[in-house]
């Protein structure tokens, strides 16, 4: 049965709270020269058009959805849907001008490479699955492109596992008798009487 818990207790117990900071911390050193930060949720295209809240080049990581806590097989997990929003603009790299979509392709591909790496994609966390269904796609309109920016979304799914009681735990028994070859023998595994 679930009992009451204060906000402070729920914050301390929630594994969701530490997920985005862990992803951000893992990506920052892998993308020097790119701003990597967490974002509070989905990006709305109208925000991209009306506001200049994303300064290129940038990767903004977000949780877009989560589910849980009991899986079909009886396991305890929180299924996460994650996004890394890639924001780029035309850049001068060395002597060459590089179009924003090429910069976005390179950054998106880099994130997909990170997601394919068994160790890095676990973000330094315990009890987390490998990413699944990773993909990248454009997330901009002709209007945002005309303003000089390109926006792409790299999305994937992961699960925080090992939550709740152990589904394989068995109840310890006490004060029970087993009959073996007609003789009763007491069984005591240290359970409550």
Image (cartoon, rainbow, N blue to C red):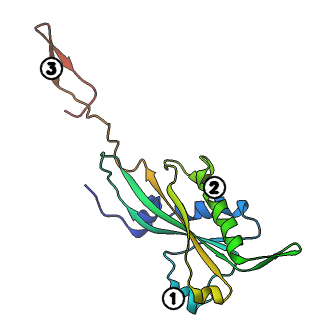
Mark 1, secondary structure of its residue: helix
Where, by quadrant of the figure, is residue 96 drawn? Answer: bottom right
> What residue would you read off at disc 2?
114
Outermost residue toward the right in this view: 95
> What residue would you read off at disc 1?
46
- The crowd level at tag 2 (other Cα within 10 Å; few <14, some 14-19, many 20+) is some
> In this orientation, does residue 35 appear?
no
Left or right of 88 on screen, residue 83? left
Mark 3 or 1, closer to the camera: 1
Outermost residue toward the top in this view: 181
Point out residue 154 in the picture as x, y percentages from the top left corner.
Answer: 56, 66
Marker disc for residue 177: 3
* Placement of the N terminus among the 4 image quadrants: bottom left
**Separation of marks 3 and 1 at Cα, in angstroms:** 70 Å
Left or right of 140 on screen, residue 66? left
Tell whether label 1 touches label 3 (CB within 8 Å).
Answer: no
Marker disc for residue 112: none
Tell whether label 2 touches label 1 (CB within 8 Å).
Answer: no
Residue appearing at x 22%, y 29% in the figure: 173
> Looking at the image, is 15 positioned above or below residue 36?
above
Point out residue 10 in the picture as x, y percentages from the top left corner.
Answer: 41, 64
Tell whether label 2 touches label 3 (CB within 8 Å).
Answer: no
> In this orientation, does residue 70 appear?
yes
Which residue is at the front of the view, 186 or 51?
Answer: 51
- The crowd level at tag 1 (other Cα within 10 Å; few <14, some 14-19, many 20+) is few
Mark 2, secondary structure of its residue: helix
Outermost residue toward the left in this view: 182
Nearer the N terminus, badge 1 or badge 2? 1
Point out residue 3 in the picture as x, y percentages from the top left corner.
Answer: 29, 60
**Separation of marks 1 and 2 at Cα, in angstroms:** 29 Å
Residue appearing at x 33%, y 51% in the figure: 71
Which residue is at the front of the view, 94 or 181?
Answer: 94
């Amino acid at each position: 049965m679930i009992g009451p818990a204060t906000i402070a207790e729920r914050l301390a117990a929630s594994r969701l709270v530490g997920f985005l900071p862990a992803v951000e911390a893992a990506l920052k050193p892998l993308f020097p020269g790119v701003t990597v930060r967490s974002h509070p949720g989905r990006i709305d295209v109208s925000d991209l058009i009306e506001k200049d809240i994303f300064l290129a080049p940038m990767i903004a990581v977000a949780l877009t959805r989560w589910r849980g806590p009991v899986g079909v097989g009886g396991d305890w997990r929180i299924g996460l849907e994650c996004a890394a929003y890639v924001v780029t603009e035309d850049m001068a790299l060395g002597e060459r001008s590089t179009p924003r979509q090429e910069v976005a392709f390179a950054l998106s591909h880099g994130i997909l490479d990170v997601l394919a790496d068994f160790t890095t994609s676990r973000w330094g966390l315990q009890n987390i699955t490998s990413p699944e269904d990773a993909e990248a796609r454009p997330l901009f309109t002709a209007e945002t492109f005309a303003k000089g920016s390109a926006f792409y979304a790299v999305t994937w799914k992961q699960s925080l596992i090992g939550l709740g009681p152990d589904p394989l735990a068995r109840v310890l028994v006490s004060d029970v008798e087993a009959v073996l070859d007609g003789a009763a023998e007491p069984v005591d595994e240290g359970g409550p009487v």
